[in-house]
Amino acid sequence: MSTRKIMIILAISICTLLYLKSDVQAENIVKSVYFYSPTCSDCMMIEKAFAKISNSNVLYLDVSDTSNLNLFFSFCDTYHIDEKERSVPILFVGETVYSNAENIIQSIENGVVDKNTENLLVDINDIKAKGNFTQSDDTKLTIVYLFIAGLLDGFNPCAVAMLLLLISLLGFVNDKKKIIKLSISFISGIFITYYLIGTTLYSFVSKIDFSIVNFVIKYFILVLCAVLFVLNLIDAINSCKMKHQKVVLQLPKRIKKFNKHLMQKVVSVQNRRFVYFIYFGLGVAISFTEFMCTGQIYLPVILLMSQTQNISSIRICFNFFIYNTAFVLPLIIISIIAINKDKVISISSIFVERMYLIKILNAIFYFILGSLVLYLFIL
């Protein structure tokens, strides 16, 4: 075979390969982008619909990944989607947006995704390269809500009563600075334990990806808020009438007795070397025994956070830090005020007399939280 023929064959082969490559690239151009979350019940139904088609032009992006979340906000900005409607699942097909499960499934079944020839309004590769992302501006509001919820939980009579009991039992300590240090050790134990309880429960609940379970959780939060709203109103009425024995939302007498006995044992320990670690451990123990009381606000907040997608791990940790900082803030302030032993009784009296106000504030909190769940996840 002559050199000329070989060159012609090579030229034809190269042209053929280039044509095939360009054809494959044309077929693989992303013309549809679907944003989803692994914990979204609607997303699971849509996933089944996508399984029935074989379109390589669809890009599937999980918003639990921070980079995908940033891209999600960029798409929302480009397609001029209202802040309230920026949620998953959402499908971008060419220049069209499908923003609920019914519409998305219908578009898939009707062949809209397969037959689409329009290009997206967003150049995905260009956005990723430039890092031109716009994030939702709800961070400040979320921090405020969490801080208020934690602060309200911190004024829980159960938590305050235990702190005042501890300070009153430290009557033999004449050094006021030492009382503050012991109180801070106790409060630190509470803070770290509550932080770990919150992040652990959140991690467990948020990983549940069964649609029926997610559906149940949303209604469970709603029912829980409704029940706690009513019970707090009943407790407010009984507290106002000074019928504290009829207050429903309080620790059982056995746990109160156990906590008091535990505190008396700890206070009697005179080991100076490990005294701060012992009081820290006391805070840890009290956190678990009082969770059924103080957790009445904490648990709904954790469950609500688990149902809210588009949150990075750093943001989750920061949210729990804000909540628990607000939770222990009243305890720190009260411990400083109550160093004067005479003020312990007066502070206790104030909380008993004003307990109905705390119950009313709790009722308002559950009403707002329940309304929020109803609006965001159910209606």
Image (cartoon, rainbow, N blue to C red):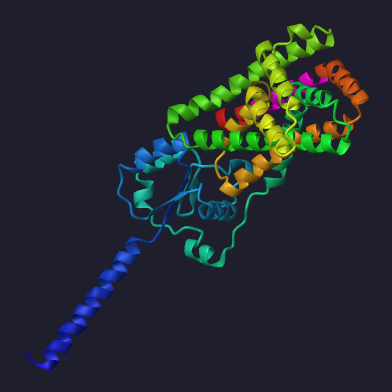
Drawn side of residue 281 relative to residue 306, left or right: right
The image quadrant where one finds the N terminus is bottom left
* Residue at the image point whose x is 85% and y is 20% from the top: 348
Give the vertical position of 28 relative to 302 (above or below). below
* Relative image position of residue 373 (x, y in whole percent): 61, 29
Residue farthest to the bottom, as pictured: 3
- Does residue 110 appear in this view? no
* Residue at the image point whose x is 31% and y is 70% from the top: 22
Drawn side of residue 214 relative to residue 171, left or right: left
* Residue at the image point whose x is 72% and y is 34% from the top: 271
Drawn side of residue 10 relative to residue 99, left or right: left
Give residue 171's quadrant in the image.
Answer: top right
Taking depth in this image into account, of 158 and 63 the one nearest to the observer is 158
Q: Which residues are magenta?
A: 357-372
* Relative image position of residue 199 (x, y in whole percent): 58, 38
- On whether residue 123 falls in the magenta region, the answer is no
Give residue 77's quadrant in the image.
Answer: bottom right
Taking depth in this image into account, of 258 and 347 the one nearest to the observer is 258
